[in-house]
Amino acid sequence: MGSARRTPGACAVGSQVGRMLVAVGVVLVVVGLVLIFGRKIPLLSRLDFHFHGKGWDFYFPLGTCILVSLVLTLVFWLLRRH
């Protein structure tokens, strides 16, 4: 029986996939926490826009968008450092 050989780049690919999965997990946790506690954070709720009209509503969560953008920036910055 032949033995399986590993290519030198296989470990690097696995490491990159692992880092990406961790980053996606962190982002999902942060987005989930924002959805749960977003209304309780005064700064976030002050930055949200909610317009009412006759027969229509428009809601734009600017504070949440800014927070998610900052978290994503931090996560990807941490991933690029390695």
Image: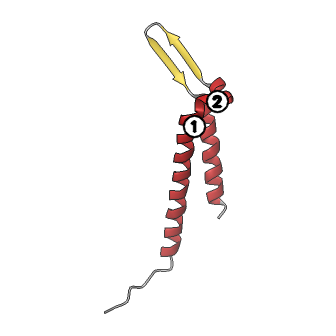
Contact (CB < 8 A) between labels 1 and 2? Answer: yes
Q: How busy is the neighbourhood of tag 2: few (under 14 within 10 Å), some, or many (20 plus)?
A: some
Indicate the amino acid at tag 1: Val
- Seen from the viewer's position, the closer of residues 5 and 36 is 36
Quadrant assignment, res 71: top right
- Seen from the viewer's position, the closer of residues 38 and 8 is 38
Q: Quadrant of the C terminus?
A: bottom right
Mark 2 secondary-structure assignment:
helix
Colour scheme shown: secondary structure
* Percent of width and height locating residue 48: 60, 24
In the image, residue 60 sits, relative to residue 79, either above or below, namely above
Indicate the amino acid at tag 2: Leu
- Seen from the viewer's position, the closer of residues 21 and 77 is 21
Q: Which mark is residue 1?
A: none
* Percent of width and height locating residue 74: 65, 49
* Percent of width and height locating residue 42: 67, 27
Q: Residue at point 57% right, 28% down?
A: 61
Quadrant assignment, res 34: top right
Cα–Cα span, label 1 and label 2: 9 Å
Q: Which mark is residue 44?
A: 2
Q: Residue at point 68% right, 29% down?
A: 43
| Marks 1 and 2, the one that precedes in the sequence | 1
Q: How busy is the neighbourhood of tag 1: few (under 14 within 10 Å), some, or many (20 plus)?
A: some
Q: Which residue is mark 1?
A: 34
Q: Residue at point 65% right, 42% down?
A: 70
Query: Horizontal placement of 45 versus 10: left or right?
Result: right
* Percent of width and height locating residue 76: 61, 53
